[in-house]
Every structure is written in structure tokens, then in C-alpha cells.
Image (cartoon, rainbow, N blue to C red):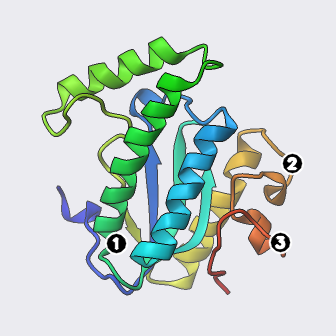
Amino acid sequence: MSRNYKILDQSLPYFVTFTTIYWIDVFTRRCYFDCMIDSFTHCIQNKGLIIYAWCIMTNHVHAIVGTNKIPLQDIIRDMKKYTSKKLIELIHTNSQESRKNWMVALFEQAGQRNKNNKRYQFWQQHNQPVELNNKIIIDQKLQYIHNNPVKAGFVNRPEDYFYSSAKSYAGITGSVPVVLIE
């Protein structure tokens, strides 16, 4: 792992991205979004995760995160491990999921190609953490995260996208507790 992908200073916030293997559009059903939100909430309550901003798109998740307890790389590792298993289970058991066989076959194919997995791989392995050590970079990443659904054409205004912290920044209560960046 290169130095650029390591979390060196635990006192700073980091911009991270979790991307599904093959950029599969998994997040198309509420139960899949809820799985990520539940994992965020669990890590906030039990592991010391601090979320400053977040957005769940169809095939990736962006967040600005920090920690006040467990090292951030450990929280991210545990979150990705848990959500991988849980999301694949949800896909397997969802009778409404028309793409079930196709998605599971791709997760299994990716898992077999990677010696770090037992059977499946859901997330790409890298998180590409970017250390946010100044206000300019923080503002840039915050705007990038919140404008992602607008750029994708899902909504006209960032705060209209349900699966994002843009609501919180607009003064509307969101589904994940965030620490607002002033």
C-alpha cells in the first residue's frame, strides 16, 4: 500500500470513497441504503467514528470522517467487512431483486480473484483516503460530496437528496448524525 493511501494523522478528518467492485449499481433499493446508514450509526455509537459529511450513490459512498477512539483505518476496515457480508446477504434474500444472480456471480468472481477474501468481494479494496489538513481542501471535498447527486442528475439541489448529509448542512435533520464543518 502506498503512502498516499495510508491514514497517518488520526487527529485530522479524511475524505474516503468506498466503491463497489466493477462499479455495480447496488444502491438502488432502500434496504441497501439503510444497511450503510445503520453501519454508519453503529460505528458512531460504538467505535468513535465522526462523520462530517457523507453521500451514498448507486455504486459508491463518499464521506468525510474522523475518529475519537479506534484508529480510523480499523473502523473503515470493520465497516467495509460488515457491510460487504450484510449487503450480499440482503441481495441474496431479496425476492424483489431482479439482478440477484448477476450481482452475486460478479461478487463471487471478484472474491475468487483476490486471496484476501474467503468467497465474495463487494467493495474495491482501496479507500483512497485524502488527508484534509486545510480549509480549502475541506470545502472542496464537502462541495464535491454534496453536489455528486446533482451532477448525476438525481436532484436539482444537494439538500433534496435523501442519502446525503447535505440536508444537515441545509438545517434539515438527516438520517445520520454529522458534525458540521463550519
What residue lies at 29% left-to-right and 76% top-to-bottom? 71
The kind of residue on which mark 3 rests is Ala
Between marks 3 and 1, how big is the CA–CA gap? 27 Å
Q: Position of residue 60 (x, y in %)?
A: 52, 43
- Mark 1 lies on a secondary structure that is helix
What residue lies at 56% left-to-right and 56% top-to-bottom? 38
- 182 shown above or below 17: below
**Which corner quadrant of the image does residue 68 belong to?**
bottom left
Name the residue nearer the viewer: 25 or 82: 82
Q: Residues within 10 Å of mark 1 (few under 14, many from 20)?
A: many
**Precedes in sequence: disc 3 or disc 1:** 1
**Which corner quadrant of the image does residue 76 belong to?**
bottom left
The kind of residue on which mark 2 rests is Asn
| Numbered label attached to residue 170 | 3
**Precedes in sequence: disc 2 or disc 1:** 1
The kind of residue on which mark 1 rests is Leu
**Precedes in sequence: disc 2 or disc 3:** 2
| Numbered label attached to residue 156 | 2
For mark 1, what is the residue?
A: 72
What residue lies at 49% left-to-right and 84% top-to-bottom? 134
Q: Position of residue 168 (x, y in %)?
A: 76, 71
Q: Position of residue 88 (x, y in %)?
A: 43, 32
Q: Position of residue 61 (x, y in %)?
A: 53, 50
